Amino acid sequence: MSSPEQPDDEFGDLLADVGEETAKLQAFAEKMLALEKGREPPDELIQEGLTALTRLYTVKFQVGERWSPFVDDRAMPATAVMIMCTAMLRAVNVELFELGMWQAWSGA
């Protein structure tokens, strides 16, 4: 396992800064808490949270941490994961085949 400051060689340079993403998540949490009760969060706010969480999880993975992205006491339906993965792959123009190849090459 690599030290927290250095990514695993196979994953290259760190893709985000933990402190920066943590600050963005704190700002996201403050905005969520400021919403009126019962009001749905705007799409942009959801995007903000997903972006920061994804980047933070990525850095943790790059430095050798391997843990489930979901808490144990809250089941995540496979359909929900497939919907999110599909949307994320489309957003960055990555095909499923490319993901499979990356997983095979990287050992992720």
Image (cartoon, rainbow, N blue to C red):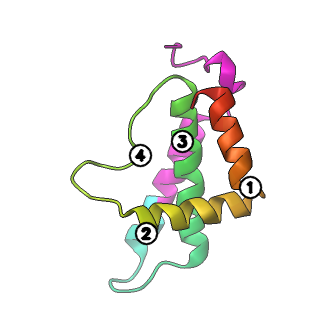
Total tally of numbered discs in the picture: 4
Which sits earlier in the primary sequence, circle 3 or circle 4?
Answer: 3
In front of the other: label 4 or label 2? 4
Q: What kind of residue is marked 2?
A: Met
Q: What kind of residue is marked 4?
A: Pro
Q: What is the spatial separation of the Cα atoms under label 2 and label 1, in whole angstroms?
A: 32 Å
Looking at the rendered structure, the secondary structure element under dot 3 is helix
The residue indicated by pointer 1 is: 95
Residue located 34% across and 86% down the image: 38
In front of the other: label 4 or label 1? 1
**Which of 65/37 is in front?**
65
Q: Position of residue 92 (x, y in %)?
A: 75, 56
The residue indicated by pointer 2 is: 32
Residue located 25% across and 48% down the image: 72
Looking at the rendered structure, the secondary structure element under dot 1 is loop
Neighbour tally class for label 1: few under 14, some 14-19, many 20 plus, Cα within 10 Å = few
**Which of 64/106 is in front?**
106
